[in-house]
Amino acid sequence: MASPVYFFPGVRESAVVQANRLRASFLRERGVAAAFAGITDVRAQTSCYELPGRGPGGQAGLVLQVVAPRPGVEPPVNIGYAGEVSQAWHERPAGCDCWVGIDKTWPPTPAELAIGTPTGYPLELGDGQTWKVPIVRSVQPERSQVPFDYVFDGSGRLVIEQQASPLWDLAEEGWNHYFHRAQHPTISTEILVALCLGALALNYRLGNVEQTVLRLVNSRNWSRCMELLLDAPLLEEHAALEKKTGDRSAPGLPSASPGPAD
């Protein structure tokens, strides 16, 4: 129960923090923006300090770790840099420009990496813990966690528009492969992993870096992860109801590809 620790060799605090906020540009450039999603108060939510001695790689630098992601979550058992005996350090995982440390005894939990209160379907991932997979696309569009905008057209009629989102587009490829297999028989592993991680990132501070060190999505769970983010259990529940009642006119579901509804 210790969140990941990020170490930036040769970096001073002033390069990372401004007015008690993390510099978004710095995090993006270093490739770890996803790890600090939803963090708005450096002093209250993180441990951020300059390490003058020999940190990972034998260098001085800046240590940054989320310690209070949201109210009601206990702070990490261990905070900050504790050396290679108790922490497994990874140099530049997934190409990020820093070191990432994971506590060997107390690895991160879903609660510590949560953004707000996660919603969705429970699924055990590669670390043996249960995470929540949010709905990205559904035959009932209002169930999606990807936000919609409410706007009005030229005649004053309310129109629901999907906000621009690469995740939404990825989910369309997943939808076509899952529900229209004959027309879309294949889908790349890159798209599958990006789709699963993108969905999880709606609920958790996860990106390619964290996937690389935690190994959450793997060949045993990606298929179910995709089914959950496409809201397949809703269809499974409907099919089970039809089978049980023998009533094919039971409350139906839209047959069209999911998208914004008027």
Image (cartoon, grey):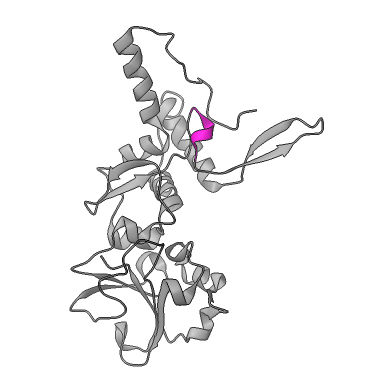
Q: Residue furthest front?
A: 72
What residue is drawn where x is 41% and y is 59%? 205
What residue is drawn where x is 47% and y is 32%? 138
Q: Quadrant of residue 163?
A: top right
What residue is drawn where x is 38% and y is 20%? 238
Front-most of residues 45 and 10: 45
What range is drawn magenta here? 139-144
Where in the figure is residue 140, as x and y percent of width and height? 50, 28
Q: Quick one: quadrant of the N terminus?
A: bottom left
Does 93 sit left or right of 88 as displayed? right
* 140 within the magenta span: yes
Q: Is residue 185 visible?
A: no
Where in the figure is residue 127, as x and y percent of width and height? 23, 54
- Residue 88 vertical placement versus 51 (above, below): above
Q: Is residue 254 visible?
A: yes
Front-most of residues 25 and 93: 25
